[in-house]
Image (spheres, rainbow, N blue to C red):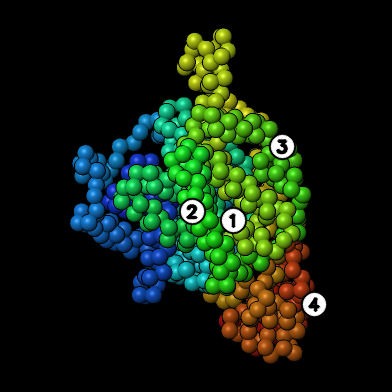
Amino acid sequence: MARMAHWVETVPTFVVLSVVLFLPGWLVVRALGARGLEALAVSPAVSTGLIAASATVAQRAGVRWGLLPLLVVTTVTVAVAWVGMRLFGRHDPDLGATRRLLGRPRPDAVVAVVIGAVLALATILPAMGRPDELVDSPDAVYHLSRIKTFLETGNFSIANPTFYPNGFHSWVATGLLPGLADVLPGTNVATIVLAALVWPIGCVALVRHALGTSRLVTYAAGFASAAFIAFPTILLGWGVLWPNLMATALTPGALALMLQAARSKRIGQWLGFVAAMPGLALIQPNALVALVVFALVWFVTARLRAGWLGHLPWLVVARDLAIVAVVGVVGLVAAPVVSAQLASTQSYEWKDRVPVWTALVEVVGGRLQVPDVLWGLMLLIALGIGWIALRARAALPVVAMWGACVLLFVMAASSTFSWTSLVTGYWYNDKVRLASLAAVPGVVLVAAAAPALRELLRKVPALGSRPVAVGLVAVLVIPLLTLGLNGATRSRMLSGFFRPTAPERVILSFEGQDSLRRLASLVPAGQGVVGRPENGSPLMWALFGTNTLYRSIPIPTTGDEIVIGTGFDDMANRPDVCEAMARHDIRWAVDSTHVYWLDRPERSSGLADLAHVEGVEPVRTDGDYTLYRVTGCGLGAAAGS
């Protein structure tokens, strides 16, 4: 398929990915009885769970995953949900069957979502550049390769090729099944769906639930969804943490439905929330942990407020808080003991520890991987907190949630105590992920600045008698103080992820892609190719379908991969290397003068300089890349056949 150079070409892919992400889950949660914007906001999590889990089951049953199996699974699930609710559940008696299923969009909410979507597209697309631009982050190689593996094999299982949450990859691969886009541009479009559609919808739902449904607050929510650099901007390119991007984008919607269900106690809303949990777990399990943290903070804040207002005796409040504390500590200590995977995740260490004050400036002031403090954003957050404390105290738990995220960030960024990993390890002890999480309740605080500004502007003589003008100014101050003041900063950050100025920060340039594409055409279908991961050759699988041994950066430390990586240059004396190459049908090798900065030379020492390796012969040089035919280990004849 030809390259996609213009975003207009991606519109069909955007539509298909959006339909696959929203429609199945939306039909399920509507059948369960959840309604409103919260139902729409949580539907992507339900859809993803349906796709990821069903695809894994299909693989076990020997069924190739595709759009038809998805249609069958969705139909059966919706039917079961509808029949179950009809027999055992309770629907709103004032709603007819059509209204219960299809709902009725609220114009103000639709406008707010459109505002958020337009701002996201206007800020993200120019900075990313082209749809087929590669984000120069090592994790991108793994994620793109896995999506390609799903598409090539029809096996979308959580265990293909190794056990790893498959929510993000199975959704993207399912949306790419019609063949409207290749893996690279298709995945870029998927991240746009998350940042410009899923995130604004969830933010508007959460803000309307936390602060009310007035037009001012609703429109402010749309603008507030684009206020932060910490999310979604930084996760579009740093890492690259696409599953975490998806999980965080879904968190506001899930949180909104959770709080709505807790207050209304409607069974359909609770069931909709529960139905979203498997999807969140199959995308990135820390999304579940985030919701647990938010739920505990909400409970603790509500209990303290009840004691303060005299609704509960302080003895009861103290008892409940003590129970929460004990259960929380026991859970934190026991979890890594029970789960080896969690223990491994919690073992991640970062060397760039900073003082507490610096950490606070990074998370509250927004100076994370950017040179300046985001003063406009800080002002809006301060105004929002003040407004909630004085005029909207029911939203105080959201302020506490934001405070909890700030605390987690400071712990991850500054603490050297080993016990802190018990808390922050769910996010790999990574302050970037925690900064993005803080944007979830942070959106509510920014949106709350609008009514605070309106009240202040009413005192201005020239504006006080013009309520429409006051409201318009109050809501437009949000984009002025965020996008207006730091738009160039976020654009430079995102552009730097996709188009680094330093050549050693580029994994594979457009010129490099062209060279490898031409060399790949010389390799017979199915035959194996090996090369240093840091020269960009692993992307030959994701981009061209070439059977590369390595499909991630860097080389694994165990198995045939490390044997070949360290012993390829000594294959004449290493029967174990020959045996490993035979198992993977390695007939070709790629060398290059280009090396990506994330280098692990000790793992690929045998592949460093193929011109001086016995057992290979050059076939063609194209640009910075040279294709070699393997002649050693008795593989030469087969390679040339």
Q: CA distance from mark 3 to mark 4?
A: 52 Å
Residue 357, picture quadrant: top right
Q: Nearer the viewer, mark 2 or mark 4?
A: 2
Residue 439 visible in the current orientation: no
- Say which of 487 and 205 sits in front: 205
Dots 4, 1 in contact, CB < 8 A: no
Choose the circle earlier in sequence order: 3 or 4. Answer: 3
> Label 1 belongs to which residue?
241
Separation of residues labelled 2 and 1 (CA atoms): 37 Å
Q: Secondary structure at mark 2?
A: helix
Q: Residue furthest right?
A: 612
- On screen, residue 505 versus residue 123, left or right, reads right
Residue 307 visible in the snapshot: yes
Question: 10 Å neighbourhood of mark 2: few (<14), some, or many (≥20)?
Answer: some
Q: Residues within 10 Å of mark 1 (few under 14, many from 20)?
A: some
Q: Of 146 and 30, which appears nearest the observer? A: 30
Identify the mark nearer the N-term, 2 or 1.
1
Inter-mark Cα distance, 4 to 1 = 38 Å
- Residue that badge 4 annotates: 612
Amino acid residing under circle 2: Asp
The label on residue 373 is 3
Residue 320: numbered disc: 2
In x, y percent, where is residue 79?
24, 57
- Tell me the distance, in whole angstroms, between the alpha carbons under discs 1 and 3: 24 Å
